[in-house]
Image: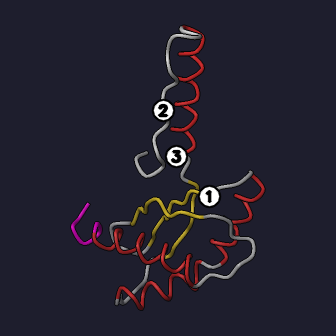
Amino acid sequence: MTLRQEKVQEQLVHEISDMIQKELRDPRLGFVTVTGADISRDLRYAKVFVSIMGDDAAKKQSLKALNGASGKLRGEFGRRARLRVAPEITFHFDEGIARGQRIFELLNSIQHELHPATEAPVETLPSSEI
């Protein structure tokens, strides 16, 4: 990955999360957190990874709303980043946080099975550390 790709990727995560918080007023959007981005070598395509709180239906609605607003977000990102050609943005679920939480739950259940009353449960990490 080139240095330019890394910088555009970092700026993309920052700007998209700022735009989602301050500018998108879609009632379908739930609690959305931008967790990362992947940008193509030619800077024309970007995958933005998001974590969405809620049930599966709410997650699908939020993702649909984000992909529906991708054109508006693309144009605004191009202006903010001063890029000649803004990348085409697609949104994808980031299952890493949910997967990490599930692993901690499994570890807790195993620990309770092995040592039912002697050990304290494994503490979960705050979401900022996952």
Residue reaching furthest to the right: 57
The residue at 49%/72% (across/down) is 17
Disc 1 versus disc 2: nearer the observer: 2
Which residues make up the magenta segment?
1-6
Identified by mark 2, the residue type is: Glu
Q: Which residue is mark 1?
A: 52
Disc 3 crowd, CA 10 A, few/some/many (<14, 14-19, 20+): some
Image quarter where the C terminus lies is: top left
Q: CA distance from mark 1 to mark 2?
A: 23 Å
Label 3 – label 1 distance at C-alpha? 10 Å
Q: Main secondary structure of the magenta part?
A: helix
- Image spot of residue 84 (x, y percent): 36, 90
Q: Residue at x 45, y 40 (%)?
A: 125
Task: Say which amino acid is labelled 1.
Answer: Ile
Indicate yes or no whether the magenta region holds residue 4: yes
Q: Position of residue 88 (x, y in %)?
A: 50, 76
Say which element carries label 3.
Answer: helix
Of callouts 2 and 3, which one flags the residue occurring earlier in the amino acid sequence? 3
State the mark number for residue 97: 3
Query: 10 Å neighbourhood of mark 2: few (<14), some, or many (≥20)?
Result: few
Which residue carries the number 2 mark?
A: 123
Residue 95: in magenta span: no
Residue 8 falls in which quadrant of the image?
A: bottom left
Q: From the top left corner, tell me how far across and down residue 97 is, in percent.
A: 52, 46
Colour scheme shown: secondary structure
Query: Label 1: few (<14), some or many (≥20) within 10 Å?
Result: many
Position of the N terminus by quadrant: bottom left
